[in-house]
Amino acid sequence: MLSLKHLQINSFNENLAYINRECAAYKVDDIKTLTKVEIHGGVKPVFAFLQVVDDPKLVKPDELALNTEAFELINLPEGANISLSISSPPASLNSIRRKIGGNILNGGEYSSIINDIAAKRYSNMDIAAFLVSSGSFMTAPEVLSLTEALVGDYTLNWDNESIVVDHHCLGGVPGNKTDIIITAIVAAYGLPMPKTASRSLTSCAGVADTFSVLANVDISEEKFRSLIRENRGAIACYDSLPIAEANKILSSVERYIGLTQHQQLVASILAIKLAAGVTHLVLDIPVGPQSRIKSTNEAMRIRKLAEYVGDMLSLEIDAVITDGSEPIGNGIGAVLEARDVMKVLRNKEDAPQDLMEKSLFLAGRMLEFDPKLRGGQGYHVAKEILQSGRALETINKIIYAQGKSAQPQLGHLTRDIVSNVSGVVESIDNERINKIGVLAGAAQYHGAGLDLLKKVGDRVEQGETLYRIHSVNSSDFAFANSVVDGYTGYEISTKGGY
Amino acid sequence: MLSLKHLQINSFNENLAYINRECAAYKVDDIKTLTKVEIHGGVKPVFAFLQVVDDPKLVKPDELALNTEAFELINLPEGANISLSISSPPASLNSIRRKIGGNILNGGEYSSIINDIAAKRYSNMDIAAFLVSSGSFMTAPEVLSLTEALVGDYTLNWDNESIVVDHHCLGGVPGNKTDIIITAIVAAYGLPMPKTASRSLTSCAGVADTFSVLANVDISEEKFRSLIRENRGAIACYDSLPIAEANKILSSVERYIGLTQHQQLVASILAIKLAAGVTHLVLDIPVGPQSRIKSTNEAMRIRKLAEYVGDMLSLEIDAVITDGSEPIGNGIGAVLEARDVMKVLRNKEDAPQDLMEKSLFLAGRMLEFDPKLRGGQGYHVAKEILQSGRALETINKIIYAQGKSAQPQLGHLTRDIVSNVSGVVESIDNERINKIGVLAGAAQYHGAGLDLLKKVGDRVEQGETLYRIHSVNSSDFAFANSVVDGYTGYEISTKGGY
């Protein structure tokens, strides 16, 4: 028996257990490698990786310390009696071996894998192995199985609403923050839209990042429910809700290794929406040479896959393939994107027209989920709601109800990237722009990002600014500056005829 | 600038950096996920994963603490000024993405991946992604590239010896400890055999485990050299030698996730032998229904692959396909295997004949690397060396020179597994026997394992013992007992005619 101690260390999803090398109860010196242990004493065994400590000030020989993640799970006071045993690898790892061998896994296998991930029986390495093994191919029924498994056993419900809508964009297009505008329009119309939003994975800002500039997005389930009752719309960070927990663990590894495959992405998105109690989803699939989805064929395969999984799990999906050839709006990064969104909602003259038009188009598709609305009328109704100021009024109510943010400042370290020729902007490379934005610090600091002053088709004179880099932190600023000179992401055509 | 602190925590190959959440120099609260950082201040930047600490007794806001692995790498005293930056993912991760996409990687890509692994730029997750991505297929030139990369830039050299021999078995056959006997015979003959041995990966005992029962195997490079000069033979644990370092990191992840593919295995084995300065290798490929290699076709593919890589890198390989249908010898687990080995070397009457015959066969193949020996004479010369007692004399010299061990005790917790019918042992399942041995504690405790009293073809009466379980630790003993009753691994034929 060992005495429980809490070492206040956060390890981002991984449970760690610290044992003194001189521990009398276990032959620690025989442990030569990464070892997973089960810690007994709480209601359920807690799985953790063993770390060996040589300093009794950290952990005494008769103690076992846990990091914060594991300490919260075991839910016992310090000093409690606990014991440990070497954990045998979860049986579902055999399915991963089968997947590596090119086999198709069945529903029971996906369910076992995901249950083991949710129970923290997998290390991050095992999760990476799972992601990569299923990354090379998954059949449609496998994606269905994975989706069902990821939904888990707890879903939100919305007081017998027959239509609960949401929108999700597959990503890859910088600045594309239609979601907040859509939420305002749809809620103003009266359809319930409990929007679950994510923080940035690999982009400059996720919807949760951008809306957090305006309002609190860490919303409890209860609060989410009361917000929808009051205002019909709310935007909550998915991480703050008690749903699709295994998917959160998968995502943290996906984010780190950056290897998400389309099938996994579809399963993950649909699982979150199903767990959030959504019945009708508009799925935006932007296509462009430097978007996440490169070709219409690829987009069509994703659409068919999402429709198949949606049909099997009773989620109505309207998948729309949109133009992802250049960034949407002008701002990239949370503060700048929030600025664009508010310009559109305030019907400002300098509001980005592409952001407005795309938002109206998508909101229109969502409104048409309402059986009372005639086909083709969605866009016009959405436009009326926006132009009348009702969308602005609604977003202000939502912001107030969620709790207004102390708006972060735009980064003060700036540099203008200017054109070295006169001509017309021929293309803007999404991947390059995203990379420069991330290097400028956008994924970490809401105030960092890029402000695009020119878009495709705009006339530009030699020496005129194409975009402005904003950084919060001087090392990020230096980093972005060091790469931007190699290639700005803009192609300028100097041919005549424009 | 932060002040360096050492937290005496060992994390098995992963560098960890601990930062206080209130650290003034970095906005730690913005770090929401697994983050790799570069720590500056030493000769080279050190890469580490960030852990966030809430207790100033562990790490103060103006400190950055490193675990033991990272602290040793940065090689600065506590209190030194250091700084950190967010590390951008290594460029070679793109090659892993390409591999997942089904592409063939070139030599430069393998070299970049392995260099990044050696420099600790990869997390264990990234390494798992690499292993799994290349697990589905690798072409022969890819295996060559990986082998070359794994050899690294430091290899042992042996004073202009023109022939330096070693033996390696691909594994999967419990008890198969021919290596020690072969080393004794070959060294007695006079060929230099600097045997590099590994500890158990997934088996009950590696060669390094078994020989460590008899002698110290943690041998420095200098000592290894002097041992070979004196005695012509020595058995060193590969981990203790400064060679093929990236392969050690790969192995620790492979061992954990248990997903080694044959191509990776070939690259890893040949890289270690090349880095150890071996010129001539006998590669033993045991085939059996429950061996690692299941079919002769599979064994032939491995043989061709090893020969191709060997030819390209000037390593002479004699690959022999052997019988892996049942365990070799009687003991399984380090202490019991060492007992069998010494019985053979002492020419005891009860020495396991299969272990002796296989050792003579393989030693004979190795002796024939000597151009002075006539083809077909190897076996007879080996037998003469064994029977004359010269092999025993040599192993005793080697044990003495390496440092005799305080021989560990055989586990005192025992149970006899008896036959419930009378008949003849028809088969013994290697995988099952290995699993029961591992559960009995053999991979952790040298004194644990199984002692097989009956082998295939042996007559057994009802109630007679088939094998004896030995455990050191009562929880292992209980674990082994709980599974052995399900299936002992033995099939007994009760048909007549024997």
Image (cartoon, coloured by chain):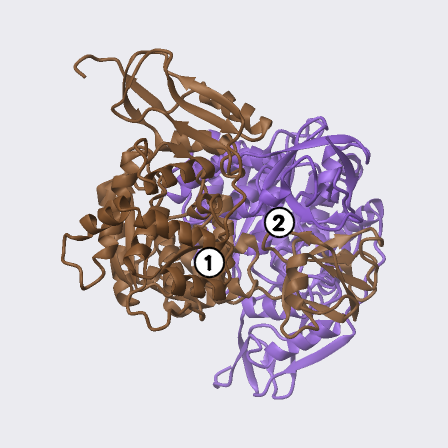
Chain colours: A brown, B purple
Percent x, y of residue B360 = 63, 53
* In front of the other: B310 or B59: B59
Residue A247, disc = 1
* In front of the other: A437 or B200: A437
Residue A152 in view here: yes
Q: Chain of mark 2?
A: B
SS at mark 2 in the image: helix
Same chain check for tags 2 and 1: no
For the point 57% across and 33% down, which residue is it?
A: B115
Name the amino acid, label 2: Ser
SS at mark 1 in the image: helix
For the point 63% across and 42% down, which residue is it?
A: B28
* In front of the other: B121 or A452: A452
The residue identified by callout 2 is B252
Name the amino acid, label 1: Asn
> Marks 2 and 1, Cα distance to the nearest angstrom?
27 Å
Q: Chain of mark 1?
A: A
Left or right: where A246 falls relative to A79: left
For the point 19% across and 52% down, which residue is it?
A: A378
